[in-house]
Amino acid sequence: MNRPGVFGRARVPFGGGTLHAWSDRLTFVFGLSLTLSALTGWYSGSGEGTTVSVIGWHTGTVGKVVFFLGLLTVVLIALREFGIELPAAVPESLVAIAIGSVATILVLVRLISIPDTFFFASRGIGIWISLVCAVGIIVSGLLAASEEL
C-alpha cells in the first residue's frame, strides 16, 4: 500500500526503492548544513581577555564558494521535489558527487592551510562540520547512484 509521503511523492515500503528517497533527504540535509556551516566559526583564537572567531564566509573566496555549493545542492533537490529534473544525460547523483567532491577539496585546503591573516587562530568547529557535510554529500550521491544501477 502506497501512502503519500513528503512533498506528495508516494511512500514505498523500505525494501522497494526508498533508498533513493533516503539519499535525497540526506543530500538535502547535508547541503543545508554545508550552507550554514560556512557561516560558522572556521577559525578561532583567544588573546588577552578576548576571543575571536572567523566565519567561513570571511576566509576569502573559498568560504563563499563552499556556501554556494551547499546552496546549489539544496536547490538541486528542491527543484526535483517541485517536478523540475535535470536532463537524462546528467544524473543527479553524479552532480551531487561532483558538488561534494569540490566542496571537500576546498574545505580540506582551508583545513590544511590556515590563511596568514589568521595567524592567531586555530581550527574551529565550523570547518570540521563543513568537512563532514561535504563528505556526506558525496556519500548520499553514491547511495543515489547505487539505486540507479
Image (cartoon, grey):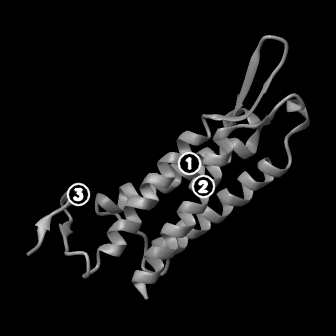
Asked which secondary structure carries label 1, the reply is helix
* Residue at image coords 29%, 79%: 17
Quickly name the residue at label 1. Answer: 34
Residue 73 numbered mark, or none: none
Quickly name the residue at label 3. Answer: 6
Foreground of the two, 56 or 49: 49
Quickly name the residue at label 2. Answer: 132
Residue type of the residue flagged with mark 1: Leu
Nearer to us of marks 3 and 2 is: 2
Foreground of the two, 27 or 52: 52
Q: Report the side of 16 relative to 58 (left or right).
A: left
Q: Look at the picture and state if 95 lies above or below 39.
A: below
Residue 105 appears in which quarter of the rendering?
A: bottom right
Q: Report the side of 96 relative to 82 (left or right).
A: right
N-term-proximal mark, 3 vs 2: 3
Mark-to-mark CA distance, 3 and 2: 25 Å
N-term-proximal mark, 2 vs 1: 1
Return the x and y of residue 72 as percentages of the image width and height.
52, 53
Foreground of the two, 17 or 73: 17
* Residue at image coords 54%, 61%: 136
The N terminus, quarter of image:
bottom left
